[in-house]
Amino acid sequence: MFYRKSVEERIADRIAQRRPLEDGKTFEHGPAKFVFISLIVAVVLMHVVGVAIVMAFS
């Protein structure tokens, strides 16, 4: 009466309903792509600023 599928079965059903990924598409989730690129840009900027500061005081 109160049967509910296990978590694994529900996850498997949800994955089975997805469409296959397209070739060359790395991120299926737009915000994940935005966060990833933002973090990369922030790290590169911090390194450039750090190197500039070290060069200015040496």
Image (tube, rainbow, N blue to C red):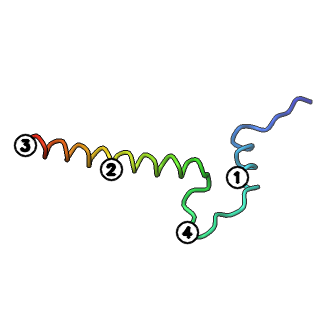
| Circle 4/circle 3 CB separation < 8 Å | no
Q: Secondary structure at mark 1?
A: helix
The answer for how far apart the CA atoms under marks 3 and 2 are is 21 Å
Give the residue at x 70% y 45%: 11
Nearer-the-camera pick, 13 or 18: 18
The answer for how far apart the CA atoms under marks 4 and 2 are is 25 Å
Q: Residue furthest front?
A: 56
Give the residue at x 69% y 42%: 8
Which numbered disc, 3 or 2, marks the residue that appears first in the sequence? 2
When the figure is inspected, residue 41 is found, relative to residue 19, above or below; the finding is above
Tag 2 residue: 44
Q: Secondary structure at mark 4?
A: loop
- For disc 1, the neighbor class at 10 Å (few under 14, some 14 to 19, many from 20) is few
Q: Nearer the viewer, mark 3 or mark 2?
A: 3
Which residue type carries mark 2? Val
Which numbered disc, 4 or 3, marks the residue that appears first in the sequence? 4
